[in-house]
Amino acid sequence: MTKSLMPVDQAIEIILAKVKSVTDIQSVSLLNALGRVLAEDQVSTIDVPPLDNSAMDGYALRFDDIAEQRLTVSQRIAAGEVAQPLVAGTAARIFTGASIPVGADTVVMQENVAVHDDGIEILHSVKRGQNIRPRGQDIRRASCVLSRGEQLRPQEIGLLASIGVEQVNVFRRLKVAVMSTGDELVEPGLPLTEGQIYNSNRYTLSALLMALGCEVIDGGIVKDDFSSTCDQLKTLASSADVIISSGGVSVGEEDHVKAAVESMGDLSLWKLAIKPGKPLAFGDVAGTPFFGLPGNPSSVFVTFCLCARPYLRAMQGVENFEPIFTRATAAFDWLRAGSRQEYLRAQVVDGKVTLFNNQSSGVLASASWANALVVVPIGGTVTAGDDVGVVMMSELGC
């Protein structure tokens, strides 16, 4: 490994050590809370369900009365109705979700009952307590259902609704500015001339940030010159919590981002032992955190997911912000030992992992095809059948 290249784990450690989480709190309606981060624990004030209730359409009865030849039906209980105490030796017609009457301890599903003029007949063996969902089975009163620092997904939104929450206190959204560098870039919708390419990075990064629940500030395309780069960085630093650029952090004569950042702030790291994505900068512009990602599309995707995303999640106040790595069995050979840690775009199916046929950093189709990244350590090789480290795209929010 080249001495100037920093190992990925060391770089992430340096990046995360710089995190300053947001502290501003907002109260939002539950319907508008998707993707927001809880600023306080959520404690239930009720039991869920609030009463013992039926898990089936059927008949509520006393288990000890099953020996009777026939059980007359003494009442009908629908969900939401108040049940009367069960008369001994009778059964109650009951529907899913309806409260169990006092005295009943078992529900027999209707498919296992024969209905006669003089009552019901139990056709199959019954266990005491079957088909009853007890009070508090899901959630107990005074229990903490969600903790501070959890990011709300659809299932958490539903969970909070189930305990009657209508407003939640959350941390404010991060404002993240996205800027692209390169005179060759053109926005989609415009015609291309020779030597030009469409600016996919702006759209990739904006979508990744929106999926995180961030507010995106569009920094546009910046010309490949030092003065324009400085001017735009200064403007974005005054309005954003974080700035993310793509391109311009290499060592070419037209790459001005690194020099511009250093003239206005500080760089904590530059050049990682990572593939794709060696030229990655992290620092600040006038005190505003800054990520300078490479220009190649797959490099942008990988470096954002592995380096920028954990930082942003920690800054949002998320408690568990680092992706979980797992293992899979290689169904491929990778025999080229490299000087950088590689993240190969891959698919994991039934525990076996295969690679996209082109791992070039300019091939964005590989990231779209993949559902995982395979990690190949520095100097490592892979032979089919080997146990390899992978991180699923779902762990990266993709």
Image (spheres, helix red, strand yellow):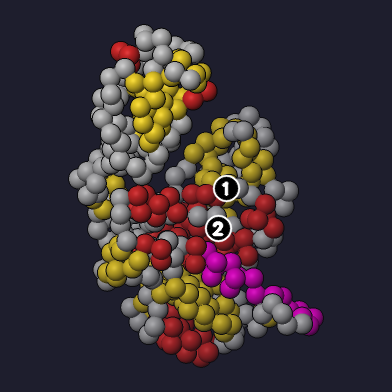
Is residue 112 at all visible to an observer of this figure?
no
205 up-or-down from 393: above or below: below
Q: Which mark is residue 302?
A: 2
Residue 333 locus on image (x, y percent): 68, 37
In the drawing, does residue 200 fall left or right of residue 129?
right
Bounds of the magenta segment: 192-208
Q: In which quarter of the image is residue 32?
A: bottom left
Residue 356 locus on image (x, y percent): 70, 48
Near-viewer residue (220 or 134): 134
Asked if the residue under mark 2 is in contact with the one under mark 1, i.e. CB atoms within 8 Å, the reply is: yes
Q: Residue 307 carries which label?
A: none
Near-viewer residue (362 or 315): 315
Number of other residues with Cα within 10 Å of mark 2, as a class: few under 14, some 14 to 19, many 20 or more? many
Q: For residue 256: magenta?
A: no
Look at the numbered disc 1 and give the secondary structure of its residue. Answer: strand
- Which amino acid, by three-letter code, is at mark 1? Leu
Residue 47 locus on image (x, y percent): 26, 42
Is residue 101 at all visible to an observer of this figure?
yes
Q: In which quarter of the image is residue 170?
A: bottom left
Outermost residue on the left side: it is 142
Residue that badge 1 annotates: 373
Outermost residue on the right side: it is 194
Residue at 45% from the left image edge and 54% from the top image edge: 154
